[in-house]
Amino acid sequence: MPNIAELKEVALSLRRDIIKMTCAAGSGHPGGSLSVADILVVLFFREMRINPDMPGAPDRDRFVLSKGHAAPALYAVLAARGFFRRKLLDTLRTLGSPLQGHPDMRKLPGVEISTGSLGQGLSVANGMALAARLSKSRTRVYTVLGDGEMQEGQVWEAAMTAAHYRLDNLTAFVDNNGLQIDGTTDQVMGVEPIGDKWRSFGWHVLEVDGHDLEAIAGALDEAREVRGKPVMIVAHTVKGKGVCFMEGQADWHGSAPSPQERDEALKELEGKKEGQ
């Protein structure tokens, strides 16, 4: 199992890949991909029982990227974990590429469900968790939602369902970066207090710095010990994390960097790698 220092290196690598991919494609969603990168690194490299050589193993853990527009982050972590060749990352959003704008389970190993229509991922994760229980599998299910995504009513139907069935093999994250395509979540449709809402729906709630790898790992350790309730980890994040001119800017929700901006971002990320 990689240590925290090694996970930090992987997270930096993911961020570089996200910038390169979205620049090459000329489209995509870098802001929310950068904010969720640290969560995915801990899940795929430390937490989940997965095997790239056997992506369809029946008792594998499952991951659902409910905020499917953050596909560049998912593709980057799948490539880093060995599910497919890294060279494929260069084809994001190109005609005929399996790396579509949103994840497609028919195209890539490691993608458990096609997502992108916001609000639906938690319902799918519920079904996976319930199926695992019924089949007496040790599979655990993980999903990541966006904070703006919680404005969808289906999320709260799924929240009730997971608590009703006491799905303690389900752990969800909210990537709480406070921004969505049209501005702040407070301006568009306020979702706070997030933690209290999920508690009131019967979930065990934890709150962490979503860029603190150690804190994320610790929350997942606690989640595995919870019995009789699903777990929601509210991860406080920064949209565009790691690239100073993108951080906290709603404009980078769905805008790709230019070649000049790519070079600037990569220079900054290289500096972080070297400890500058």
Image (tube, rainbow, N blue to C red):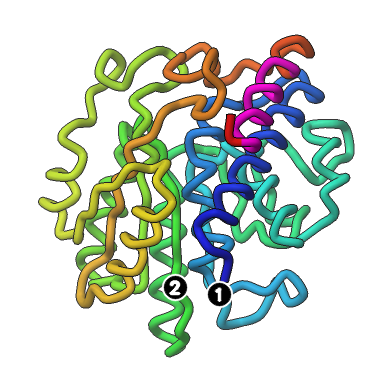
Q: Residue at x 33, y 42 (%)?
A: 209
The percent coordinates of residue 87 (x first, y second) are 88, 45
The percent coordinates of residue 177 (x first, y second) are 37, 30
The percent coordinates of residue 254 (x first, y second) are 58, 20
In magenta, the rendered stretch is 263-274
Q: Are there few (<14), some (14-19), or many (20+) residues within 10 Å of tag 2? A: many
Q: Is residue 159 magenta?
A: no
| Sequence-earlier tag: 1 or 2 | 1
User: Left or right of 248: which side holds 150?
Assistant: left
Task: Please identify the dominant SS of the magenta region.
Answer: helix
Q: Are there few (<14), some (14-19), or many (20+) residues within 10 Å of tag 1? A: some
Q: Residue at x 81, y 24 (%)?
A: 24
Residue under numbered circle 2 = 140
**Residues at circles 1 and 2 in contact by the CB criterion of under 8 Å:** yes
Residue under numbered circle 1 = 49
The percent coordinates of residue 246 (x first, y second) are 53, 17
Figure label count: 2
In the rendered structure, find residue 17 and report the number of the disc placed on it: none
Q: Is residue 268 magenta?
A: yes
Tell me the SS state at disc 2: loop
Quadrant location of residue 225?
A: bottom left
The N terminus, quarter of image? bottom right
Q: Residue at x 60, y 27 (%)?
A: 30
Q: Amino acid at mark 1?
A: Arg
